[in-house]
């Protein structure tokens, strides 16, 4: 399933959602992702040496902030503009 199709699935279910998360989940890895008009998405994998990817991964930290947000409201405001 392409990133574009995955990004459309929530919309078909009546949910408003962004494109970044579905595309990132679909393709994985380290990529440059370009979002264009008409739902066109271009994904270019970066050829990163394994040692560099490992160093980057070991330097990352994930933090839980207990703060939630509803991206649906943000996206609806963007579509209305």
Image (cartoon, grey):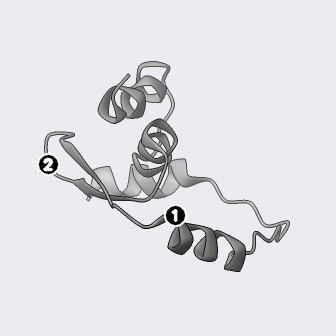
Q: 49 or 70: nearer the eye?
A: 49
Q: Relative to 42, does residue 60 appear above or below in the rendering?
A: below
The residue that disc 2 covers is: 37
Name which quarter of the figure residue 60 lies in: bottom right
Q: Which residue is at a point 35% across and 35% down the rendered structure image?
A: 3
* Direction from residue 4 to residue 37 in the image, left or right: left
Q: Secondary structure at mark 2?
A: loop
Image location of residue 14, percent across then percent down: 48, 24
Image location of residue 10, percent across then percent down: 48, 28
Q: Which residue is at a point 69% across and 80% down the rendered structure image?
A: 59
Please state which of the two labelled residues, at mark 2 or mark 1, is closer to the viewer.
1
Image location of residue 53, percent across then percent down: 54, 68
Query: Which corner quadrant holds the N terminus?
Result: top left
The residue that disc 1 covers is: 50
Query: Which corner quadrant holds the C terminus?
Result: bottom left
Residues at marks 2 and 1 touching, judged by CB atoms closer than 8 Å: no
């Amino acid at each position: 399933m392409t990133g574009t199709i995955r990004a459309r699935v929530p919309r078909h279910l009546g949910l408003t959602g962004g494109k970044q998360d579905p595309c990132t989940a679909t393709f994985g890895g380290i990529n440059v992702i370009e979002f264009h008009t008409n739902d066109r998405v271009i994904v270019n994998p970066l050829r990163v040496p394994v040692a560099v990817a490992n160093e980057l991964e070991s330097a990352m930290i994930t933090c839980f902030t207990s703060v939630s947000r509803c991206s649906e409201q943000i996206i609806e405001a963007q579509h209305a503009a």
